[in-house]
Image: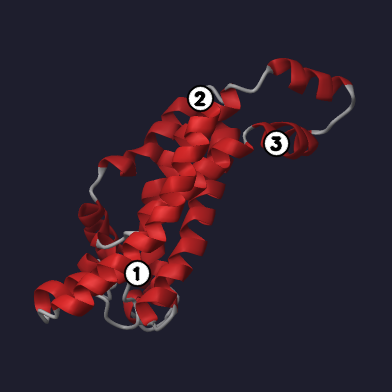
Amino acid sequence: LQALLNNALWAVVVPAAATFLGLLVAQLTDRLSWGNIAKSLIFMPMAISFVGASLIWKFVYAGDPDIGIINALRDSIGLDPMDPVQVPFWNNFFLMIVLVWIQTGFAMVILSAALRGIPEETIEAAIVDGANPFQIFFKIKMPQIMGTIVVVWTTITLVVLKVFDIVFAMTNGQWGTQVLANYMYNQLFVTRDWGVGSASAMVIMLLVTPILIWNVRNARAEMR
């Protein structure tokens, strides 16, 4: 039950945060002269494996102020050190940050391409009609790329439902951070409970399959 609830929390927070940040970066850097450099830096985490990213953030969250950035900041203002991944409930969000950090680059690239594909005539017409930048973005651009936003959202959701490496490398499901894929691994290969492990795998498949079918149908509809 805890793994299911945590997976549901991941599925709500991570796709929303990664898609929002990707869209924000794509829009803000689209017309900057150094925008491509900024995009390259934000996309760079995509080249790192989930385990590698987990180890990087494990150092960021380290309880030793000489190593962990968070505890170095806490120490500088006189607060006692803490281990963020051991704080109940909130530790899930600290783990989610790792996946958001990785997936924001993916969302940015896809959404940036969608924004560049918007006909300039529609934007120019909106400017002539007196629309301000916020109205242009939310009423002109957003409706035209909504299909791409949904595809990015659902694709990241598929990644989230199968998340394993980050939880395994950072907490192994301890302190209330268990997710379905890590639970499945522990049941199959640690406790050797093949029945529960197989059932967990089936639950993951049942959660992923509807989203996958929906994405395939949308892709086929757009190709027609």
Q: Amino acid at mark 3?
A: Pro
Q: Looking at the picture, tell me which residue is in the foreground, 96 or 223.
A: 223
Q: Which residue is mark 2?
A: 223
Residue 156, given in percent of the width and then of the height, sits at 43, 50
Please tell me in which quadrant of the rendered image residue 121 appears: top right
Q: Closer to us: mark 2 or mark 1?
A: 2
Q: Secondary structure at mark 1?
A: helix
Q: Residue at x 47, y 43 (%)?
A: 215
Q: Is residue 70 left or right of residue 166?
A: right
Q: Amino acid at mark 1?
A: Ala
Residue 221 can be seen, yes or no = yes
Q: Quadrant of the C terminus?
A: top right
Q: Which residue is mark 3?
A: 143
Q: Closer to us: mark 3 or mark 2?
A: 2
Q: Secondary structure at mark 2?
A: helix
Residue 66, given in percent of the width and then of the height, sits at 25, 69
Residue 76, given in percent of the width and then of the height, sits at 40, 72
Q: Is 46 drawn above or below residue 69 in the view shown? A: above
Q: Which residue is mark 1?
A: 72
Q: How is the image coloured?
A: secondary structure
Q: Residue at x 43, y 80 (%)?
A: 89
Q: Which mark is residue 4?
A: none
Asked if the residue under mark 1 is in contact with the one under mark 2, i.e. CB atoms within 8 Å, the reply is no
